[in-house]
Image (cartoon, rainbow, N blue to C red):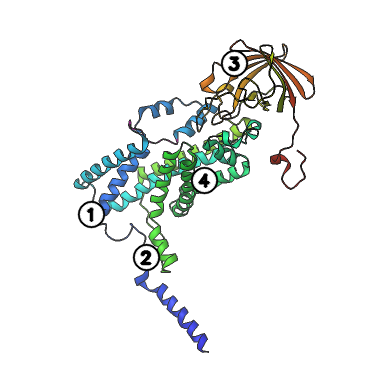
């Protein structure tokens, strides 16, 4: 009985604690009076994020109004969503300059009494609207090209035959994510879902909370693997933190101190033109998202934008050992150190051929490769990789000729014109000349090896 009474006393204590009006925590910022420091901080933040979010570079608008309704136009729009200001300084230094401008502007703004103090709460509301929609368009656009795995393709056969140490860090990360397309789709789904939560003020806290963790991880990966989006991911992370900060005090009171907490109920009144403009803006934003979604799916079904469109040499897909190699009538024995001797060759399913040799490569360090219409300019597969030369080729089936063009922007003068002849089902002879007028005669032997990616690690594999 004594134990029972103690339990009841504890429950009554909790019930009293939660029902006490003294412990009701009203939403942060939307209750009580704002002090001078809070108002100045708000105005500085508004100016900072406006200057960070609204393009001030005329080239942005030139690009925007030059967009056409096609695949190139779609990916140009995706790229434009990642806008961050550049004022002639390295990006993070530009941020510092913008912050200084915002502080000065915020102090001057506070001296100008054109906005009543009681309207500061409305100002804060519209500030959050700006952040919500800027963050939403950023994460939804990039989430969709992950949902329909376009941003990070599955590793090519050439990548499977490249030593780990021959990849730049960003390419290691992309290959690691790309080997599981459904995981990339899951990441995209999380981004899109969190972005959609930002469109309703009642679910902003949930969306911002998800994105603080998600974008925080993306930001860390950008810095660790040098992915090239360090500035943009940091910007989105900062917006997520600012949006979530509105709910942190209430979450702390509710989850840590276990006090009764009210949900945010503030809502401005829209009348007349303001009401119509609000509805029209939401409709326009939802239409933009719909266009992004349809375009992403269409591009995924038609052709991933990072992979060449042209079909490769018929029945040639595979990994080939270079059985014999003759350069200018000199037969070169197999060597892992001779820069002139081919070691192996890979034919992709598309019109790309890669050659492994010991020749010193000028590695293409291009990251986050965008859309390109020509196959030779689709350099994702060749960028960030050493030890292999990647060639885009054109097949003349009637003459039995391959015309090869080096995909590396640093070696565009490198080309080959090679005749091809099948000696049997798995043996291919290539002979012709390179751009230096050296004659080449190589016999390639296809190695039909199993890959754990496709066979699975739970089944016996004979290598």
Report, in whole angstroms, how far the alpha carbon at label 2 lies from the one at label 3: 71 Å
Q: Position of residue 341 (x, y in %)?
A: 65, 21
Vertical placement of residue 438 versus 269, above or below: above
In the rendered image, the quadrant that contains the C terminus is: top right
**Callout 2 secondary element:** loop
Check if mark 4's residue and mark 3's residue have beta carbons within 8 Å.
no
Labelled disc at residue 415: 3
What residue is drawn where x is 80% and y is 24%? Answer: 425
| Nearer to the camera, 23 or 447 | 447
Whether residue 48 is visible here, answered yes or no, is yes
**Looking at the image, is 288 positioned above or below residue 417?**
below
| Left or right, residue 459 beside residue 412 | right
Residue at 63 percent across and 42 percent down: it is: 180
Residue named by callout 2: 25
Image-quadrant location for residue 179:
top right
Q: Which residue carries the number 4 mark?
A: 191
Q: Earlier in the sequence, mark 1 or mark 3?
A: 1
Q: Is residue 264 visible?
A: no
For marks 2 and 1, give the CA distance.
22 Å
| Other residues around mark 2 within 10 Å, as few (<14) / some (14–19) / many (≥20) | some
In the image, the segment drawn in magenta is 81-88
Main SS, magenta region, reads: loop
Whichever of labels 2 and 4 marks the residue nearer the N terminus, that label is 2
Q: Which numbered disc flags the more N-terminal residue, 2 or 3? A: 2
Q: Mark 2 or mark 1, which has the lower sequence index?
A: 2
């Amino acid at each position: 009985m004594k134990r029972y009474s103690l339990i009841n006393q504890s429950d009554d204590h909790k019930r009293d604690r939660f029902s006490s009006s003294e412990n009701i925590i009203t939403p942060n910022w939307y209750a009580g009076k704002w002090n001078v420091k809070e108002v100045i901080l708000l105005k500085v933040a508004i100016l900072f994020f406006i200057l960070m979010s609204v393009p001030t570079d005329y080239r942005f608008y030139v690009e925007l109004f030059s967009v056409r309704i096609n695949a190139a136009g779609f990916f140009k729009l995706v790229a434009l969503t990642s806008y961050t200001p550049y004022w002639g300084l390295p990006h993070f230094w530009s941020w510092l300059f913008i912050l200084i401008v915002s502080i000065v502007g915020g102090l001057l703004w506070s001296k100008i009494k054109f906005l009543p103090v009681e309207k500061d709460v409305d100002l804060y509301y519209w500030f959050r609207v700006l952040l919500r929609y800027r963050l939403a368009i950023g994460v939804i656009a990039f989430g969709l090209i992950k949902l329909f795995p376009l941003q990070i393709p599955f590793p090519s056969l050439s990548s499977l035959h490249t030593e780990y140490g021959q990849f730049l860090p960003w390419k290691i990360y992309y290959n690691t994510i790309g080997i599981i397309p459904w995981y990339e789709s899951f990441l995209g789904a999380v981004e899109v879902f969190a972005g959609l939560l930002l469109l309703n003020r009642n679910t902003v806290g949930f969306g911002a909370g998800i994105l603080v963790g998600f974008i925080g991880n993306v930001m860390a990966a950008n810095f660790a693997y040098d992915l090239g989006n360090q500035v943009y991911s940091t910007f989105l992370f900062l917006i997520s933190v600012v949006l979530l900060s509105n709910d942190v005090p209430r979450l702390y009171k509710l989850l840590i101190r276990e006090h009764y907490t009210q949900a945010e109920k503030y809502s401005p009144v829209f009348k007349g033109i303001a009401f119509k403009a609000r509805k029209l803006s939401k409709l326009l934003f939802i239409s933009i998202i719909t266009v992004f979604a349809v375009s992403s799916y269409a591009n995924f079904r038609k052709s991933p934008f990072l992979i060449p469109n042209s079909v490769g040499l018929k029945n040639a897909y595979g990994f080939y050992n270079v059985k014999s190699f003759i350069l200018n009538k000199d037969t070169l024995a197999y060597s892992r150190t001779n820069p002139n001797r081919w070691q192996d060759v890979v034919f992709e399913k598309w019109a790309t051929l890669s050659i492994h040799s010991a020749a010193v490569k000028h590695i293409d360090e291009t990251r986050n490769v965008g859309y390109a219409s020509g196959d030779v300019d689709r350099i994702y597969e060749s960028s960030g990789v050493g030890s292999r030369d990647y060639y885009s080729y054109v097949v003349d089936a009637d003459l039995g000729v391959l015309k090869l063009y080096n995909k590396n922007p640093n070696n565009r003068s490198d080309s080959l014109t090679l005749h091809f002849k099948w000696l049997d089902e798995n043996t291919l002879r290539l002979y012709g000349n390179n751009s230096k007028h050296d004659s080449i005669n190589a016999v390639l032997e296809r190695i039909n090896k199993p890959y754990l990616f496709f066979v699975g690690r739970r089944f016996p594999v004979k290598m």
